[in-house]
């Protein structure tokens, strides 16, 4: 028996060595973190003509011909695609980013209507206030140009209950900081301190396990199979043991207090999966992110793309909009040979390239952009897609208000409005309704945010005004019959159903926050088919593949990786790691690392350790705002 134990141990050690060797044996490309790219921040640019020149660079075949050929083509300009593009540009690759919308940024873009600015997908970002990897990565990606405004310490406010019942609505704030988070909740649940402390301890345990989960994206598929066969997965990291459990399952173990369970699960809408189906690991990732403090981009979310695109251009790359990729082209041998971009008025432009990175999502990439023969010839692809499901879609109500945030007492925070403590029942009942019934029903959750109160430049740019964004989950089937109709020109039946949902959502919002009702100046509702049009998501989903427990199974999670079965084709964005801004960003870094054969997370950590963690600005002889064109070229060449 002792001999057998020794042999098994030797096999395990040998297996671990093989896993490490297979992950590191490839010749690496250039290190995009070899230099600290942070510069002194320039003045905020408010001129729309200057911004549009960066964010709305329209696609033409002539521009491609003039600026090509390209080493890498990236489909999609969301956070994942732009992150990958910046890092590859820093490593000497000439990158072309193609965006089907009329401006770059994906869910980071903003738009203007009737004198108001609206954000679309970035509502708050955690881990910006201290020397975290999130903050440091963003500083590198934007050259230190992206600035932030701290939001309220009570970053989320739960409104639990309904104004039309006797008990009314209870307000429970969620605050940043570990001890403050615990003490605040104990004030509302004085008998539940032990449960609350246990919950926070689990959040921290999971955070420590995340690097192990990410590492599985770096290992070869066969080494992962060996790891599983030898029973090393849970010894290597507790990430999967925690992540394959549902949020509800863990809540039921922590406490018998149903109200506390609901409060601790309140932000399930941030990834779109109810507690009884959601991965506990995904919930841990999200809440831990917020405990470090929450911030908002100064100048709005479009600042993100505005400061990343020049970093791509410094490497000779381009980001072009109104460039819908219809097909990923393959050579006779089955490897990538380029992409086909549709032209307005018919026709197409084929762009040759041997490396293509898709941020369009795993469903779009394999079911829409690649020939059917790829999926038919690779059973493991079909098996993977069958394990996944589309995440839920949503409605977005954009509200312009003719009073300032101060006048309306709007917080630099978000409201989560939950009609009852039975989150699973409310969500299920709503999603099982037909469209007509749902259009007049109380939604299972309303997320209400005020970008005007979060952005320190808003009052200067839009004096005497404010805005709000209300998000409600929905079903794509409710609007699917109108998906092929032209945007802004859809039928009367569509408009009537849209108006019914808009009225219900706005009425509910005003019942909870009555000061908004008389200040309304503009209202418009984005529906699930609106999402499909602008995001090109198959079912209007905003979180890519669903974040249920099945996605975090070891086999499934490790297969959702940058490399694909098609030589030269890589994935990036939310499906590579997790949904959300930070998830897409780190997924983008993993994708760039796969192309470069480098562990870019290790490279970034090494750079962070080498520079002063307290240094926030980097003086230069001249600022970006006053540089001549020649000086800018010199700085760009030096940074390359």
Image (spheres, helix red, strand yellow):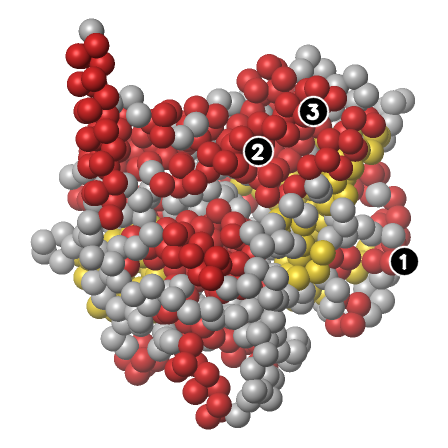
Instruction: For marks 1 and 2, give the CA distance.
Output: 39 Å
Q: Badge 3, how many Cα within 10 Å: few under 14, some, many 20+?
A: many
Q: On the image, numbered disc 1 is attached to which residue?
A: 407
**Residue 23 in view, yes or no:** yes
Quadrant where the N terminus sits is top left
Nearer the observer, 99 or 630: 630
Residue drawn at 73 percent across, 35 percent down:
179
When asked about the image quadrant of residue 403, the answer is bottom right
Residue identifier under label 3:
196
Q: Nearer the viewer, mark 1 or mark 3?
A: 3
> For the residues marked 3 and 2, what is the alpha-carbon distance in whole angstroms?
13 Å
Whichever of callouts 3 and 2 sits on the residue coming sooner in the sequence is: 3
Task: Choose the circle earlier in sequence order: 1 or 3.
Answer: 3
Q: Residue at x 67, y 15 (%)?
A: 255
Left or right of residue 26: residue 422: right
Most extreme residue toward the front is: 2
Asked if labels 2 and 1 touch by Cβ distance under 8 angstroms, the answer is no
Q: Horizontal and vertical percent for residue 125?
A: 62, 51
Quarter of the image containing the C terminus?
A: bottom left
Residue 298: where, in percent of width, then height? 67, 65
Check disc 1: other Cα within 10 Å, few if <14, some if 14-19, many if 20+.
few
Residue 44: where, in percent of width, then height? 65, 75
Is the residue under label 3 in contact with that under label 1 (CB below 8 Å)?
no
For numbered disc 3, what is the local secondary structure? helix
Q: CA distance from mark 1 to mark 3?
A: 36 Å
**Which dot marks residue 204?**
2
User: Residue 120, labelled with which disc?
Assistant: none
Q: Residues within 10 Å of mark 2 (few under 14, many from 20)?
A: some
């Amino acid at each position: 028996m002792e001999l057998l134990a020794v042999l098994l141990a030797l096999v395990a050690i040998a297996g671990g060595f093989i896993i490490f060797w297979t992950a590191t044996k490839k010749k690496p490309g250039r290190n995009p973190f070899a230099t600290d790219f942070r510069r002194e921040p320039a003045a905020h640019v408010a001129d729309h003509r200057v911004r549009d020149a960066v964010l709305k660079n329209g696609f033409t075949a002539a521009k491609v011909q003039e600026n090509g050929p390209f080493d890498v083509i990236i489909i999609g300009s969301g956070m994942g695609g732009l992150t990958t593009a910046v890092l590859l540009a820093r490593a000497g690759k000439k990158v072309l980013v193609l965006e089907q919308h009329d401006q770059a940024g994906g869910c980071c873009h903003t738009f203007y209507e009737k004198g108001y600015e609206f954000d679309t997908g970035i509502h708050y970002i955690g881990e910006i206030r201290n020397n975290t990897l999130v903050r440091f990565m963003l500083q590198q990606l934007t050259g230190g140009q992206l600035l932030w405004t701290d939001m309220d310490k009570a970053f989320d406010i739960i409104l639990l209950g309904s104004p039309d019942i006797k008990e009314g609505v209870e307000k429970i704030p969620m605050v940043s900081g570990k001890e403050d988070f615990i003490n605040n909740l104990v004030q509302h649940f004085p008998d539940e301190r032990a449960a609350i402390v246990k919950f926070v301890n689990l959040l921290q345990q999971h955070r420590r396990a995340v690097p192990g989960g990410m590492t599985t994206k770096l290992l070869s598929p066969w080494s992962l199979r060996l790891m599983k066969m030898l029973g090393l997965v849970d010894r290597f990291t507790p990430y999967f043991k925690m992540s394959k459990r549902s949020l509800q399952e863990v809540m039921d173990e922590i406490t018998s207090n149903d109200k506390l369970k609901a409060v601790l699960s309140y932000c399930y809408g941030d990834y779109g999966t109810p507690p009884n189906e959601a991965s506990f690991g995904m919930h841990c990732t999200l809440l831990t992110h917020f405990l470090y403090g929450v911030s908002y981009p100064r100048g709005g979310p479009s600042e993100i793309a505005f400061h990343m695109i020049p970093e791509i251009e410094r490497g000779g790359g381009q980001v072009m909009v109104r460039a819908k990729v219809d097909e990923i082209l393959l050579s006779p041998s089955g490897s990538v040979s380029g992409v086909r971009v549709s032209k307005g008025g018919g026709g197409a432009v084929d762009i040759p390239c041997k490396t293509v990175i898709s941020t369009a999502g795993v469903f779009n990439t394999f079911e829409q952009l690649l020939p059917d023969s790829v999926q038919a010839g690779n059973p493991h692809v079909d098996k993977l897609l069958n394990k996944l499901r589309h995440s839920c879609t949503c409605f977005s109500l954009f509200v312009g208000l003719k009073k300032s945030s101060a006048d309306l007492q709007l917080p630099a925070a978000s409201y989560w409005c939950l009609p009852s403590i039975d989150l699973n029942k409310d969500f299920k009942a709503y999603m099982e309704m037909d469209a007509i019934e749902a259009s007049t029903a109380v939604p299972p959750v309303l997320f209400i945010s005020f970008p005007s109160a979060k952005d320190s430049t808003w009052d200067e740019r839009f004096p005497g005004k404010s805005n709000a964004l209300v998000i409600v989950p929905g079903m794509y089937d409710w609007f699917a019959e109108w998906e092929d109709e032209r945007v802004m020109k859809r039928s009367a039946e569509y408009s009537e159903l849209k108006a019914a949902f808009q009225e219900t959502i706005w009425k509910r919002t005003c019942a909870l926050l009555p000061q908004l009702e008389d200040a309304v100046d503009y209202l418009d509702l984005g529906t699930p088919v609106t999402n499909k049009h602008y995001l090109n998501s198959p079912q209007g989903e905003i979180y890519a593949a669903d974040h249920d427990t099945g996605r975090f199974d070891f086999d499934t999670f490790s297969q959702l990786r940058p490399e694909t079965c098609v030589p030269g084709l890589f994935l990036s964005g939310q499906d590579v790691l997790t949904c959300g801004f930070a998830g897409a960003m780190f997924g983008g870094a993993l994708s760039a690392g796969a192309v470069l054969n480098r562990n870019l997370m290790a490279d970034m950590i090494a750079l962070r350790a080498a520079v002063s963690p307290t240094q926030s600005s980097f003086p230069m002889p001249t600022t970006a705002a006053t540089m001549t064109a020649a000086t800018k070229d010199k700085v760009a060449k030096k940074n390359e």
